[in-house]
Amino acid sequence: MATEAGPRQPARLRASIAITPYPGKFAPIPLVGEFADLLPRVAGLGYNAVELHVRRPEDISPARLDALLARCGLQVAGLATGQMFTVEGLGFSVKDPALRAGAVERVNEFARRASDLGAAIFVGYVRGSVSTEAGEREGDLGRMADSLRRCCDFAAPLGVDLLLEPINRYEVNDFHTVDQALAFLREVGRPNLRLLLDTFHMNIEEPSIFESLRAAAPHSSYIHVVDSNRWAPGFGHLDFEEVARVLRETGFRGTLSAEILPRPDGWAGAAQAIQVYRRMQATIEGT
Ligand code: LER
Ligand code: MN
């Protein structure tokens, strides 16, 4: 199949957390503020990576960010793109050709930056809202596939992966499960289109989180590791030791990332998540 192992599987596990310079719409982001303040504290907690939620790549000065990352010993694991749709209406499936072309162009700008950073690009809300009406739905999904092929073809020579995230039914109308997302990956047919998993969504949608992790394994090296209530792992009722055992079995070497609600507050969530990621890492690596 065209979507077997992608080029960006990092050689070691990354423990990452979501950060943004400005409050976002919808996405659960624990840490909001000046990166010069956030990054040293994130590194101090023991994370080795961050994922950035920004509307445009230039919202963060590349030179300043690169210097800060180097000083703190952090990598950027992923770039989230949802705010370009939730705030500006730029989406892969939208009917308006200007907004659709704008989404493709903006994601390509993200790909240029992602290439320098060694980051992957998330494809969540940027898909645009897809109709549930039979007559409309096909067109929406066709435009989404076409936009994705354009972005994947632009990103491939840059060594950048795009990651399609199955998202729960209360947020989107398109792909809720790993199976549905894998079927769409096959339809798009680009090897640098892979999966972003999120245990919060998986807990709502998958018959078995563990079986779905196994099914997704050849196509995924990035997981939002979040508890059932969308708080940091350990604050809800999911079994992350069993998640880690499955990831050990599948040979996972990728990113565990805290895209979590700021509860009881962002830093308390960040401190909790890294404790769980450390234990998971020991299980996954068998140390
Ligand atoms: C949305 O629910 C989500 O999980 C984000 O990762 C979307 O980009
Ligand atoms: Mn997510």
Image: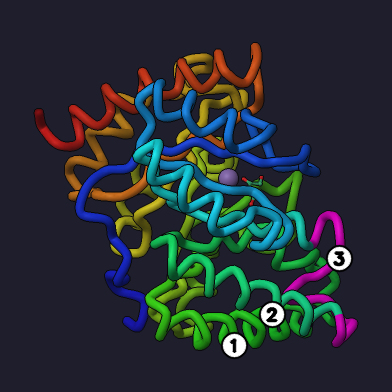
Identify residue for label 2: 104
Residue 22, above or below 133: above
Q: Are marks 2 and 1 in contact (CB under 8 Å)?
A: yes
Q: Residue at x 77, y 61 (%)?
A: 84
Q: Nearer the viewer, residue 66 or 81?
A: 66
Was residue 87 drawn as part of the magenta stretch in this picture? yes
Q: Residue at x 57, y 18 (%)?
A: 267
The image position of residue 210, as x and y in percent, is 35, 40
Q: Nearer the viewer, residue 247 or 21?
A: 21
Q: Nearer the viewer, residue 55 or 224?
A: 55
The image position of residue 48, as x and y in percent, is 35, 37
Identify residue for label 3: 89
Q: CA distance from mark 2 to mark 1?
A: 7 Å
Q: Are marks 3 and 1 in contact (CB under 8 Å)?
A: no
Start-end of magenta stretch: 85-98
Return the disc, 2 or 1, that comes first in the chain's sequence. Answer: 2
Q: Amino acid at mark 3?
A: Gly
Residue 247, visible in the rendered structure:
yes
Residue 217 in the figure: left or right of residue 99 = left
Q: Quadrant of residue 280?
A: top left
Which residue is farthest left? 287
Identify residue for label 1: 150
The secondary structure type at the circle numbered 3 is loop
Q: Residue at x 69, y 32 (%)?
A: 33
Q: CA distance from mark 2 to mark 3?
A: 12 Å
Q: Quadrant of residue 281?
A: top left
